[in-house]
Structures are given as C-alpha cells and as structure tokens.
Image (tube, rainbow, N blue to C red):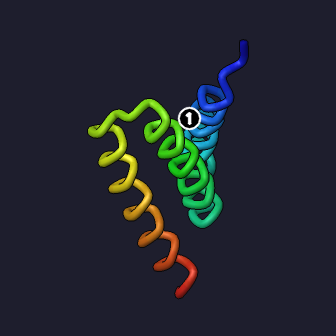
C-alpha cells in the first residue's frame, strides 16, 4: 500500500534538491520553503523529535532569507 506521507517526504527532498540546482535566489528559496514544509509534515508523521526541530529551524531560516530577498 502506498504511504501518502512517504510520498510527501520524497517530494520535499526533490524540491530541496531542485532548489540547490536553481540559480535564481527567490526561486531557490521558494523550493527550499515548500520542500522544508513537506519534510516537516513527514517528520511530524513519523514523530521524530530531532527531525521536527531541524525542519522548523530550516523553515524559519529559509523564510527569513526569502523575506529579505522580497524586500530588496
């Protein structure tokens, strides 16, 4: 049976990987943000406290960077 949360996690990793390869900063941060949120959903599903905290820090960092880029 297909586990929806695994698919969400894989999509998160794929989006973050695309973000690494993207040259435009705002687009890169957008991929990071969406990928990070998807990975956060997966980490909540598997109830891994360390992974949850790491993803929250990642999402906050990317959000801050994206807001800085938008203001420029």
Residue, far right = 1
- Between residue 64 and residue 43, name the one nearer to us: 43
Which residue shows up at 29% across the image and 39% down it? 49
Choose between 40 and 3: the one closer to the eye: 3
Q: Name the residue beneath numbered marker 1.
A: 13
Give the side of residue 44 with respect to residue 22, left or right: left
SS for callout 1:
helix
Question: In the orientation shown, which residue stands out farthest toward the left?
Answer: 50
Q: Among all residues in the image, which is located at the extreme bottom?
A: 71
Task: Provide residue 69's location: percent of width, then percent of height.
Answer: 52, 76
Q: How many marks?
A: 1
Question: In the image, is residue 62 above or below residue 23?
Answer: below
Q: Is residue 13 above or below residue 20?
A: above
Snapshot quadrant of residue 2: top right
Position in image of residue 15 (x %, y %): 63, 42
Foreground pick, 55 / 1: 1
Q: Is residue 32 left or right of residue 7?
A: left
Reply above or below: 24 against 20: below
| In front of the other: 58 or 56 | 56
């Amino acid at each position: 049976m297909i586990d929806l949360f695994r698919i969400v996690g894989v999509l998160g990793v794929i989006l973050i990987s695309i973000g690494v390869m993207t040259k435009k900063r705002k687009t890169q941060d957008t991929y990071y943000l969406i990928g990070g949120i998807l990975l956060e959903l997966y980490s909540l599903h598997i109830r891994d406290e360390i992974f949850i905290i790491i993803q929250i820090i990642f999402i906050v960092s990317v959000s801050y960077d994206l807001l800085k880029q938008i203001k420029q």
